[in-house]
Image (cartoon, helix red, strand yellow):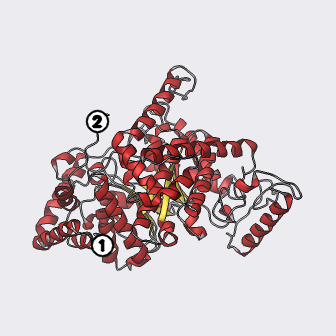
Amino acid sequence: MDAESIAEGRERWAKRYASAAKREADFTTLSGLETEPVYGPPEGTADPRMERIGWPGEFPFTRGLYPTGYRGRAWTIRQFSGFGNAEQTNARYKMLLGAGGGGLSVAFDMPTLMGRDSDEPASLGEVGHCGVAVDSTADMERLFAGIDLGDVTTSMTISGPAIPIFCMYLAAAERQGVDISRLDGTLQTDIHKEYIAQKEWLFPPEPHLRLIGDLMAYCAEKIPRYKPLSVSGYHIREAGSTAAQELAFTLADGFSYVELGLSRGLDVDVFAPGLSFFFDAHIDFFEEIAKFRAARRIWARWLRDVYGAQTDRAQWLRFHTQTAGVSLTAQQPYNNVVRTAVEALAAIMGGTNSLHTNALDETLALPTDQSAEIALRTQAVLREETGVTNVADPLGGSWYVEALTDKIEAEAEDLFLQILALGGETGEDPAAVAREAGERHEIGPVTTGILRGIEDGWFNAQIAEAAFTYQQQLEDGTKHIVGVTKLNETVTPDLEILRISGDVEQGQRAVLAERRSGRDNAAVERALAEIVAAARGTANMIEPILAAARAEATLGEICGALRVEWGEYRENTAI
């Protein structure tokens, strides 16, 4: 880019920055030196990279979504939490909010994630152990007791039974007296990544996609601030993928949901702002920063050039980040505090919109109150003491970071071509291929490729190969993990960990039995029948599921009725 164009870009940015709201804060260094809100090429110089780097707050958003960076608003501290029963988790939420958390993020136990009730045989021994148990709307009421759902943003990490859980959340908000149109938060709902990595599905892909389409339409019409989809790369990376695979598979999943919305006749400029993303922040500091910057750039270009988004908001990639659970070690667990801090800093330098920092003991158990507080304070130290909020995209223009951003972007684009080829589309420019092939597919060409890749085991094979390669590097000494492959001697004693009492499961089962006996079971049966009738037709399914949630139908009952109607998905293990 020539010097004149760079000067014009700087002037555009300066005007937007001047008119934007800024926080009341000190943006000098620790020694009192003044800092500029953004840095670029020296005045009067050309830089051919600037077309791809740009300025904060303008296309292609490599440097961030807002002209002010974190001077306008710091990232949201959103700690993922849930364990035991609803009352126990409610107490943890109030502790986190009181200690500086800016929003809630709900972790559900395994029975809930699989659409099962706490008293089902398959749930035995799992209730409350990896998250909170939620069986019906009454549990949602207890989970958020004393927390105004109209004022706090709430993220819920659940995909297979996401829609029934969301309807219970809506019903709980109604019981608080909250107008549901005011609700703000995020529901994960990303079923593609379940087939690709995490394996927590209920039905075959097509019924899940129908439910997701219904939710997108419902939220666009009735809950405009709520984000019905958080497209998750976190679980793909935790399964063993490379950074480029995490980026490509996650964005491809996002493109598929855009295609789904368009196939429903929805306006991309209306529904695309309701899509958000969830990435892993791993331990390779610069690679992660480059990944986040490339993600914004790719998403903006595809949304504009392939899917026709006209507004900035529809082209924005907003994302939450969680530090890498897979990087934590049971050996010398206090090293995990250092790993988490480095990973959190990478997410911040990459421009994350919200952040969860893992606790040092999470490789062993759910966090204790003390370890959860250390994780929370890690973000506070980074925000308040390090100066990272002073400058937007402070590594922008770094020769290494820009080259790495370009390289990861190129690897992702190559993977897009491979996904499109799975759906029968070939070419050299993946965005052009996707744009030209749209009408040949029921939903879209990326969706066709993803579904074929799931069925053929292509994604599983790609991730398995990457994980195997890394494991080989650890075993041959090419790469190291401190405390595991080297520097193994330690004076650290065993940790005291959080243990979930068996009384939690017994109590939850008893409460559930009492709840069933006290409700209007005839109303529940009618509501379940309405869900099945809707499943057999084409009507939006959110309202009948919401009616069942209001009647205290359980998660297992709702999902069970749909399992009978749609069947259960079985992975092709013969690949």
Q: Position of residue 285 (x, y in %)?
A: 62, 41
Q: Where is residue 161 in the image (x, y as percent from the top left)?
A: 29, 58
Q: Residue furthest right?
A: 44
Q: In which quarter of the image is the C terminus?
A: top left
Q: Is residue 61 visible?
A: yes
Front in this rendered view, residue 253 or 132: 253
Front in this rendered view, residue 357 or 191: 191
In this rendering, position of residue 468 left or right of residue 2: left
Q: Relative to 512, does residue 408 appear above or below in the rendering? A: above
Residue wearing tag 1: 171
Q: Is residue 377 visible?
A: no
**Residue in view at x 81 percent, y 57 percent:** 32
Residue wearing tag 2: 573
**What amino acid type is highlighted by mark number 2?**
Thr
In this rendering, position of residue 132 left or right of residue 70: left
**Residue in view at x 61 percent, y 46 percent:** 409
**Residue in view at x 28 percent, y 42 percent:** 571
Q: Where is residue 497 in the image (x, y as percent from the top left)?
A: 39, 41
| Mark 2, secondary structure of its residue | loop
